[in-house]
Image (spheres, rainbow, N blue to C red):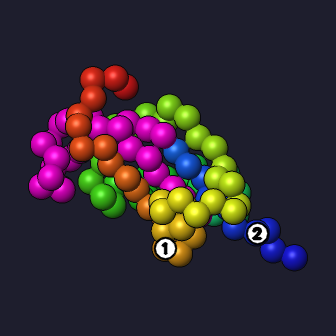
Amino acid sequence: MANPLIVVLFLLTAVTSGKDPHYKPGERHPIVAYIRAETREQAEKVLPERLAEQGWQDWHVLKSGVADPTSQEEGVKSARENGSSITIFSEATTFK
């Protein structure tokens, strides 16, 4: 029997490459990333790919955890449906 899919949440900061015109190149922003995977380890491997696709680099994970399987939070729901979801805080930060 296959493992049920989980959603892993990552609280991190990352630097924008300028790919998204809403963010000034070189600024560091807080991000919450939601990754659907079979295991936490698999989600950790997928995270850099998802960040790079959206133009984020030099990332640093502050905390991570598995979402409650019954969560109806929008980011978790989106990750369940699409494989991943990323929420970027609009204000830049100075902490890494």
Bounds of the magenta segment:
11-36
Looking at marks 1 and 2 on the same chain, the residue that comes earlier in the sequence is marked by: 2
Residue topped by disc 1: 82
Q: Residue furthest top?
A: 95
Q: Residue furthest right?
A: 1
The x and y percentages for residue 14 are 34, 39
Residue occupying the point 15% across, 52% down:
22
Nearer the observer, 68 or 21: 68
Amino acid carrying mark 2 in the image: Pro
Work out which quarter of the rendered image holds the C terminus and state it. top left
Q: Quadrant of residue 6?
A: bottom right
Label 2's element?
A: loop
Queried whether the magenta region covers residue 16, the answer comes back as: yes
When the figure is inspected, residue 63 is found, relative to residue 2, above or below; the finding is: above
Nearer the observer, 13 or 88: 88
Is 11 displayed left or right of 87 in the figure? right
Is 48 displayed left or right of 55 in the figure? right
The x and y percentages for residue 54 are 30, 58
When the figure is inspected, residue 38 is found, relative to residue 89, above or below; the finding is: below
The x and y percentages for residue 71 are 63, 60
Residue topped by disc 2: 4
Is 83 displayed left or right of 70 in the figure? left
Label 1's element?
A: helix
The x and y percentages for residue 52 are 34, 54
Residue occupying the point 38% across, 44% down:
31
Amino acid carrying mark 1 in the image: Asn
